[in-house]
Amino acid sequence: MSDDLLLEIKGLKTQFFLDEGLVEAVNGVNLKIRRGATVGLVGESGCGKSVTAFSVLNLVTRPGRVVAGQILFHRTLATAAGGDARGAQVETIDLAALDPDGKQMSAVRGKEIAMIFQEPMVSLSMMHTIGFQIMEAILLHFDVSQQEARQRAIQILNKVGIPNAAERVDMYPFQLSGGMRQRAMIAMALSCNPTLLIADEPTTALDVTTQAQILELMLHLQKEFGMSILLITHDLGVVAETCDEVAVMYLGEVVEQGSVRQIFHSPAHPYTQALLNSIPKLGSSKAGRLTPIEGTVPDPYNRPTGCPFHPRCVRFIKDLCDQDNPPQIELNDGRSVRCWLHDPRQGVQS
Amino acid sequence: MLRYILKRILLMVPTLFVISVIAFIVIQLPPGDFLTSYINNRAAEGTLISNEEITNLRMQYGMDKPMINQYFIWIGSILKGDYGYSFLYRRPVSELIWERLVLTFVISLVTLLFTWVIAFPVGIFSAVKQYSLGDYVATAFGFLGLSIPNFLFALVLMVLAFQYFGLSLSGLFSPDYVEAPWSLAKVGNLLQHLWIPVIVLGLSGTAGMIRTMRANLLDELHKPYVTTARAKGQSKFKTLLRYPVRAALNPFVSTIGYTLPNLVSGSIIVSVVLSLPTTGPLLLASLMAQDMYLAGAYVLLLSSLTVVGTLVSDILLAWLDPRIRLSLRG
Amino acid sequence: MTAVSVPTPTAPRRGLPQGSQEKKTRVFVASQGTLIWWRFRKHKPALISAVVLILIYLVVLFAEFFAPFPQENYSVKYTYAPPQTLQIFLNGPNGLEFRPHVLGYKSVLNQESLKRVFTLDPEQVVPVQFFAQGEPYLLMGFIPATTHLLGPTAKEDPMYLLGADRLGRDVFSRMVYGTRISMTIGLVGVTISLLLGILLGGISGFFGGWVDIAIQRTIEFIISIPSIPLWLGLSAALPSDWSPIQVYFAITLILSLRGWTGLARVVRGRFLSLREEEFVMAAALDGSSELRLIFLHMLPSFMSHIIATVTLAIPEMILAETSLSFLGLGLRAPAVSWGVLLQEAQNVRSVVQAPWLLVPAVGVILAVLTFNFLGDGLRDAADPYSR
């Protein structure tokens, strides 16, 4: 794996301090995103994928907080200034150490790292036109006039495939269809040429046809803009179609990260294996039952000791897996796994 | 949008018609009429009025005709601009109401401004800094303001002012300014006395508005579109004002229409306690004496204000909320 | 209704801390009522208010016991006498003794105003006792009794815990009796509003169409009539020869005339949106009749919201009655309500002379505050979608 890293998350811990107890939503996540790559972040509902994404942009609000870890963003200074990326210097900043309400963080948000959300109907303001909302992003980060910002907005709306952009720019989100709303949100995110786009379940709320169109659009724009995408989803099919690499999350930890090929063909972590096993496959016998993962996701206030997956793991090792949480282990093929089965010192075969 | 406004204005007409009928009925409800109480009052003073005089008076004031006729006579003259004659004060109604109406409006408008200027930022602060000390204080104040009847508050204030400052707070002017012609000094005197009615009247309105603003804003503050704005790099403050506050304004605005008529009618009792020369005490006296024209004109006036107020807030709401505005276009 | 419980997992639980399993099942099988109660418990002001209100209604039930004297008792000797605060302990020859008492009066005739001015005399000790014997009464209307919570040991002694009014009547006793009327008028009025509101709002929302339009127009008409003039007008219309009971019910009716409109609107709105909800459709497809749909499925889902709204409407009624009676348009003597009591304090002169006449205001404020808190707490607890 080449080391042209754009974003490195190291040991990220984000916790929610609620009346009922402490929820360790993100419990030591390590994630690497290379320049120009599409990384999928998969996991069940509640495993912490969205919280991870929000933590990158320091958008976690009370009662939650990033309590530990580093989010190293390797930005090229040229793109920081909005210019050409070739042969430019690289500067590294730790996003987790920045003041969430400060100017530095605001300068990064929307401009160098942008985010799109799951439900465009509630993620866009109903009181403002889409043109206004796109122009707001542009005017925040570039010193241009209102007219220029408006022109850029229309341009970017065209790029995302919205017909009659010049008219639609003055429309309100509720006047557009679901698919167009999502396109408008993508336009808003891309309006400032970010180097990283975080997409939080962008197609979950859409029908299958529109889903395919949006994904295609995202990949196309990625090539054109030369940006990385962190795609958060629970749909393994989407991951297989669009991503270069995958990170699998369970209960606030990345349990396995590798290329799509590696993960899908030879999953290393028992959880990934179980996930892939549970997908109904074409051509399998109709009489056979589906194989779900045994057990249920534990109560977030009462995490299991040791490895979080051990109560449901079919390859559970007593006195090891229930005592110590396995560290991230790098495998020969460049993958990383968090499982004692792959610890060379244990001498157990995967 | 224009069609909507026109349609609503047209609808106002039957509404006002029904209201006038109800107003008429309510005022005529007590047994007897103005003449009965007038006669009783004069009798108590020691003057007896002969039956013939009574009949003459009845005919003169049209009280011998059936109710329906009386109603139409009344409505007819109202539409012509003649509001009738007050038996109680022996003056044309329009004169009586007019001279007090201006003051009533002045007090109400100043109170309205006072209420908004305070309630708006306090409500926002209370929602944003939820559970902070400031929030608790504001909420407590809100509850208290809603629980204390405003006329009692006025009474307490007056007593305190009298006991500790020797001030007599009733009326809107000091005794030497009451009959004086308008001058800068008189305006100054008015302002000196104005703050008591404004605070008293504004108390419950402010409290209610703080609570409403806080509740509405709390609803909006955690919605996804606020996060989207922050994700674009917008500052906390600008995001707050531009997005959730803007959305929270909508239910707020729909109450604006009621505020003015509420103030005008709500001040009735307070005006009695504070002896303010506004329309309130006038109404009370006229209702108790069954002074038909005065009471009727006042109730009609107030109802029209309410209806117009509702129209105004509906229009404001349509203008503010693009969802409603655009649905009306088609 | 019991919620569906999560199916227990088949794999043996390993490594999970003890007790977590039980806690999880406990939440899952709680009924909706229990859930509401738990949420309500968290709202401290509402809880305290509920307790206070229960105490107040105890006073309402047993007013005769709590009031030292009947409400009409007057005395020309003690007009505008100041309050004699209750003292529990007395500095006797043997140190502090438990001897509840009040201080007696010394009166001086003010030559200028020709009015008697009272001051408390530390020399005069008027013994009082708990559970004293006093005027006979019928507890709850049918049990004869003579014991009062507090009373002077010697029946002729004055005991004005909160002072006397212009006729020498005990403000404390009258306040206790006033509590009865003021706190029940709200309940009766709100019940009427509730019935009317649910009935008309439900019909309006459930059937829609021209029935809905007709009822909505009526509501709009009623709302456009400003409330205070309406109340004033109607109250002024009440014949002066009606008995206090008749006046009481008439006032209640007048107050609820407008009150039902707010509730009707809420109920209608809920019915309209509920009609489209899937669970209603499911029940209808299942074969439920319309009546069954309304009462078994739709009504329970927002009953708690209605209760909260109704609770919040009671303070308005109390305030309205107080205002009307204060002006002399509502209840009149010999009926006693807080508003009637406050009529004595209508002008600055009397209040300056006898500030204790304003004490009934405390009752009003307390009642309104507690009902507001209670309603707030109920609304927060009952709304399943609030945070």
Image (spheres, coloured by chain):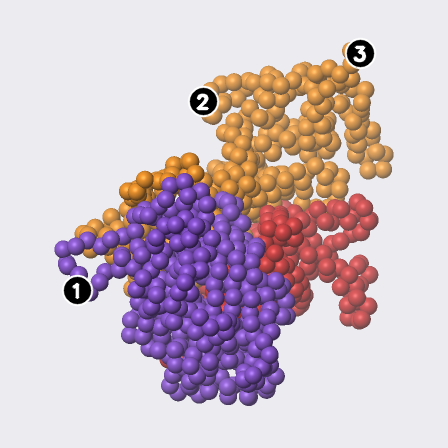
The residue where tag 2 is placed is C142
Point out the frontmost of discs 3 and 2.
3
Can you give x and y, in whole percent of width and height, for residue C288 in the image? 21, 50
Q: Which chain is purple?
A: A
Of tags 1 and 3, the one toward the viewer is: 1
Tell me which corner region of the image, top left, top right, bottom left or bottom right, holds residue C361. top right
Crowd rating for badge 2 (residues with CA inside 10 Å; few <14, some 14–19, many 20+): few
Could you tell me which residue is drawn at 36 percent across and 56 percent down? A269
Q: Secondary structure at mark 1?
A: loop
How far across and down, in percent of the image, does residue C60 sit? 52, 32
The residue pinned by badge 1 equals A283
Q: Amino acid at mark 2?
A: Phe
**Residues at discs 1 and 3 both on one chain:** no
Helix, strand or loop under label 3: loop
The chain drawn orange is chain what?
A: C
Upstream in sequence: badge 3 or badge 2: 3
> According to the rendering, which colour does chain B have?
red
In the foreground, A243 or C120: A243
Q: Are marks 1 and 3 in contact (CB under 8 Å)?
A: no
Residue of label 3: C93
Q: Quadrant of the C terminus of chain A?
A: bottom left
- Label 3 resides on the chain identified as C
Residue type at tag 3:
Pro
Q: Chain of mark 2?
A: C
Q: Quadrant of residue A243?
A: bottom left
Disc 1 to disc 3, C-alpha distance: 104 Å
Query: Relative to residue A273, is residue A136 depicted above or below?
Result: below
Q: Position of residue A149 (x, y in %)?
A: 54, 85
Is residue A334 in view? yes
Q: Chain of mark 1?
A: A
The image shows residue C226, relative to residue C36, as above or below, that is: below
